[in-house]
Amino acid sequence: MTISAERTGYQVTPEDKKFIGWHIFVAIASLLVGSLFGPLQALEFSGLDLYQYIAPLLENYYQGLTIHGVLNALVWTTFFIVGFTYLTTVKGLGRSLATPRLNRFGFWTMVVGVFTTAVPLLIGEATVLFTFYPPLKASWAFYLGLTLVVVGSWIEGWGFILTFRAWRKDNPGVRSPFIAFAGVINTVMWQIATLGVAVLILTMLLPWSLGIIEATDPQLARTYFWFTGHPLVYFWLLPAYLSWYGMLPKQAGGKLFSDSLARLAFWLFLLLSIPVGFHHQFVDPGVPSGWKFIHAGLTYGVFFPSMLTAFTVIASLEYSAKQNGGKGVFGWMKALPWRDASVTAQLLAGILFFFGGIGGIVNASYNINTVIHNTTWVPGHFHLTVASAVTLSFMGISFWLVPHLTGKKLHSPKLALAQAWVWFVGMLIFSNAMHVLGLLGAPRRTPLGQAPYVPEEWSGHLLRVSIGGTILFISVLMYVYLMWKTMRGPKADPEDVPDIPVAESIRDPQLTPAWLDNFKPWMIATIALILIAYGPQLIDQIGNIQLNSPGISP
Ligand code: HAS
Ligand code: CU
């Protein structure tokens, strides 16, 4: 018995479509505003200082960098993910949410949070970069706004979890539909992961910014931060994986190679996403090296489900291409639907992610990390991951999603295809230059155009950052233009509106082992592993808390 959404043919209700559409709208608006600040940094690297022209608006380089990071890495992603998970939950389970009012409340909480965060950001009262480490100090409104965004995402997440449970009650023993399953695992992971920043903000940053406590403990703050900060990157990534496993094979004219492997990867992400945060703190003096070593080992562990993903997704693509006449060990790749902008964007995102993943293993290696830590290598790495694997996939998804939600046709499929390629080329140039500069020792988060110590040897690479960054900016503008024109276009014939692509798996999912569809053992193991990997250090660092670091702002 297969009961994929494909067979149930459930159509998402117009109200749900509209509500999901608002999430995507806020996401794209944030991406646009956040991206306006990208070229400022990229061009500054080769000495073109645009900041002087907008001096009355921006205080300094760091303010622009903070806005860029917060809007692109935090807001664009979170709104897109929550909206997309809403869609995969209702479509996958073939029913509307159990809690529509709760989700509306969650959404508006997030929106109020974004505005509360935006005000101090724009007036220069929150120039603390997207990691907001103390002793850098922001206005209380910044911390409160971030809290509201996180709490809103929790509330929406409860809606997805409760709906999944209601479905489970009605369908005992039936394998959960993959796209709903994958979205809900990411939601559960997020609920646990965000406890770190929740404690950080509520016990330290908010009271500090309100003057209730005088100073902070930066070491403990960083530990709390990375408890959330690392799993955050998988919160971004897993919706892209959901699409690569659960949708892309259908778009490529085939099927998912293995439902079991797909589910195993998601469980491993639940298990291993959180207890690896110290790989961001290899040089922190307050964390003993034994614990860093354990987190380095667990990071190699969380590398594995991504390799599993590369295998399974490429196998699905090969199967699909061969169904459609593709031949040869590599020749089948030519038979993929490269004219389909949504498919191409996601394939290019996957290719860029290979390089990002290899860089990740360099970062994770305790001793080699000291070579690249705090250099431009790190932004090079995360532009291949969050800004490519994730962002370019989300762009590809929106090529069918926005038409589906609005009942329109994609404004220009050719422009969409070009947009994906422009991103790919821009990112190859940009990220390669950032990696090379990092190896040469260029510090991250630094206006290198003004730095007096920059050797001549760097100038070619700095120029490539500027060129790559400008190309990426052009690609964002193409994307936003396309989405705007699509949204504003005339209603299309219902046959011309793309449906949600839901891939079937080659083997009946009902044959997938039951332990790959049962939360209980995985939840127990997840919590146990977090307690082992973090418990002793948290007890130690909280026990030795030193609130003695006053705030500074640049
Ligand atoms: Fe990372 C720093 C380690 C993945 C994001 N990372 C960062 C920062 C960000 C970030 C934002 O261990 C900077 C934070 C800051 O501001 O300080 N990262 C890793 C490792 C992985 C990894 C081991 N990172 C990500 C992902 C991110 C992300 C995903 C965002 C979404 N990262 C680190 C470490 C640091 C770090 C250290 C700290 C550095 C420092 O010192 O500060 C792994 O998860 C990567 C696994 C990936 C793979 C690739 C699999 C390939 C696939 C492609 C399939 C191909 C397809 C296309 C579908 C194994 C799945 C086929 C096409 C055809 C044509 C057939
Ligand atoms: Cu990490």
Image (spheres, rainbow, N blue to C red):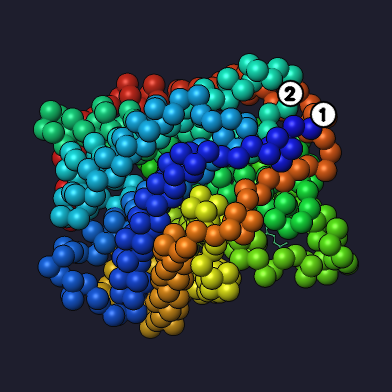
Give residue 526's mark.
none
- Which quarter of the rendering shows the C terminus? bottom left
Image point (72%, 51%), residue name: 250
377 sits to left or right of 359: left
Instruction: Give whichever of discs 1 and 2 has the lower sequence position.
Output: 1
Question: How far separated are the C-alphas under marks 1 and 2?
Answer: 9 Å
- Which quarter of the rendering shows the N terminus? top right
**What residue is disc 1 on?**
1
In-front residue for pair 18/284: 18
Mark 2 burial class by Cα count in 10 Å: few <14, some 14-19, many 20+: some
SS class, disc 2 = loop
**What residue is disc 2 on?**
174
- The kind of residue on which mark 1 rests is Met
In-front residue for pair 135/66: 66
Residue 289 lies, in percent from the top left, at 48, 37
- The kind of residue on which mark 2 rests is Val
Please determine whether, in this image, residue 110 is positioned above or below residue 428: above
Q: Is residue 233 visible?
A: no
Residue 543 lies, in percent from the top left, at 32, 21
Image point (24%, 46%), residue name: 115
SS class, disc 1 = loop
